Amino acid sequence: MKPNIKSKLIIVDDHQLFSQSLELLIKSFGDYEVIQRFENGKVFISYLQENPDTHIDLVLLDVNMPVLDGLSTMKWLNENRPNLKVIALSVNDDEEIIIKMITNGAKGYLLKDTSPEIFKDAIESVVEKGFYFTELVSGMLVNKVNSDNKKINLKEKELVFIKHACTEMTYKEIASEMCLSPKTIDGYRESLFDKLEIKTRIGLVLYAVKHKIVFV
C-alpha cells in the first residue's frame, strides 16, 4: 500500500486568526499539509531565497498585507519563481486588482468568504490542473474553456484589443491607443463578450491567458 503523499501548501496572510483557521480547514481535507505560514510577502520571499529547494505545491496569498502586499509579492514570484502555483485571497472582488493578479501569474482568485467546498475544489484544481476561477469572480467558467476545443477565429484588431484589455489601460485609453472611437471599442468589447461567451473584462483576460494570447 502506497503512503499518502500530501501536497505541501504555504499560507501568506497577516491576519493570524484567519491564517490559523485556514490551516485547520486545509488539514481537515486530508490530502494537504501547511508547511509554513507567513504574515507578509517580505518574510515569505526571504524564506524562498533561503530555502530554494523546498518543494511547494501551492501558495495561498493574501492580496492586502502590510510591508509587502500580495500584488508586489506576485510580481516578484512571476519574475523569480514563475512555476510556483498561487491562489490569491481577498475580501473584495475589485476587477482591477483581479486582473493585475492574474496577469502577474496567479492561478486562482478566491474571496475570503468562499465556502469550504469551493475552497477545496479550488485547491484541488490548481494543484492538479493549474487553474481555477469561480463564476463569481470571472464571469465565466475556466473549466469550460479548458474542455472547449472548438476553434474561435479572432480578427487582428480583436487580438490587439484583447492584449490591451489585459493591461491597466481604460477602454478610453485603448481607443486612443488603437486610433479608434470609444464607440468602436465598445463594439469590439460587446462582440467579443458574445463570441467568447463571457461577461466581464476579467473573463476576457482569463481567455487570453488560457489561449496564450498574452503570456504570464
Image: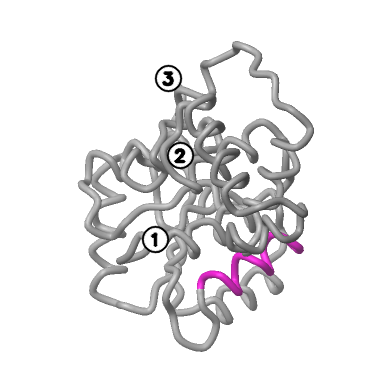
**Which residue is painted at 60% across and 65% down in the image?**
74
Point out the image quarter for the N terminus: top left
The image position of residue 9, as x and y in percent, is 46, 53
Q: CA distance from mark 1 to mark 2?
A: 13 Å
| Comes first in the chain, label 3 or label 1 | 3
In the image, 153 versus 102, the foreground residue is 153
| Comes first in the chain, label 2 or label 3 | 3
Q: Badge 2 is on which residue? A: 132
Dots 2 and 3: beta carbons under 8 Å? no
Q: CA distance from mark 3 to mark 1?
A: 36 Å
The image position of residue 179, as x and y in percent, is 77, 54
Q: Badge 1 is on which residue? A: 89
Helix, strand or loop for the magenta stretch, by majority = helix
Secondary element at image label 2: strand
**Which residue is painted at 76% across and 59% down in the image?**
177
In the image, 119 versus 63, the foreground residue is 63
Q: Residues within 10 Å of mark 1 (few under 14, many from 20)?
A: many
Magenta residue check for 77 = yes
- Mark 2 against mark 3, which lies toward the viewer? 2
Dots 3 and 1: beta carbons under 8 Å? no
In the image, 209 versus 77, the foreground residue is 209
Q: CA distance from mark 2 to mark 3?
A: 31 Å
Q: Which numbered marker is on residue 1?
A: 3
Name which quarter of the figure residue 81 lies in: bottom right
| Comes first in the chain, label 1 or label 2 | 1
